[in-house]
Amino acid sequence: MVDVLSPEQRSYCMSQIKGAGTTPELALRRALWHLGFRYRIKSKLPGKPDIVYPTLKVAIFVDGCFWHKCPKHYSPPKTRAKFWSDKISKNVARDKKNNVLLKKRGWTVVRFWEHEIRDSLEDCVVTVVRALKSRQVKS
């Protein structure tokens, strides 16, 4: 299928996609805040986690299905296939590298796909709460 947008229009559209403050991320943040789990969203940690609990050393990432190559929902674009394949592969490799770096620094890393939050926010919240409570015991 041929792209109906010009390269300039497509570039503009792709540049408007948010990297932070996405709908799934905001839903998870709201649910955690509502339960009394206060967090930070600004961090200089590797990978710039979406939600951070600095004292417990828990970093949470909400990964977009397209940008991080979700095995369930990712489908490669038909146009500029090599460009997108390279870009997405670099994102996946960077995610793995950041997980290793954070774990070496003593952090617990929790990652969710955007569809996991959309499909079962409650399960994701339970996962985060378990991670936080397991770190409280160790502290």
Image (cartoon, helix red, strand yellow):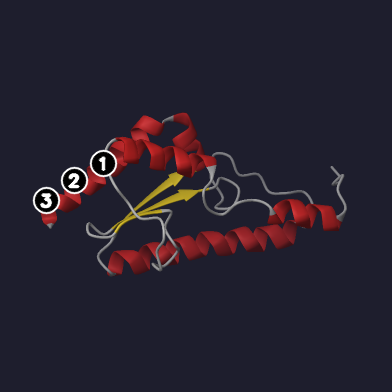
Label 1 CA crowd tier, 10 Å (few <14, some 14–19, many 20+):
some
What is the distance, in whole Å, between disc 1 and disc 2 at their CAs?
6 Å
Counting the numbered discs, the total is 3
x 60%, y 51%: residue: 18
Kind of residue at disc 1: Val
Q: Residue at x 58, y 61 (%)?
A: 89
Q: Which residue is mark 2?
A: 133
| Tag 2: amino acid | Lys
Residue 129's mark?
1
> Where does the C terminus fall, quadrant-wise?
bottom left
Which sits earlier in the primary sequence, circle 3 or circle 1?
1
- The answer to the question of whether label 3 and label 1 lie on touching residues, with beta carbons closer than 8 A, is no
Quadrant in the picture for residue 27: top left
Q: Is residue 82 left or right of residue 68?
A: right
Marks 2/3: CA–CA distance? 6 Å
Q: Secondary structure at mark 3?
A: helix
Q: Are marks 1 and 2 in contact (CB under 8 Å)?
A: yes
Residue that badge 3 annotates: 137
Residue 137: image x %, image y %? 11, 50
The residue under label 3 is which amino acid type? Val
118 and 30: which is toward the camera: 30
Q: Are marks 2 and 3 in contact (CB under 8 Å)?
A: yes
Q: Position of residue 114 (x, y in %)?
A: 50, 41
Residue sitting nearer the eye, 47 or 19 = 19
Q: Left or right: 43 with respect to 66?
A: left
Q: Vertically, is 118 above or below 7?
A: above
Residue 59 % position (x, y):
34, 56
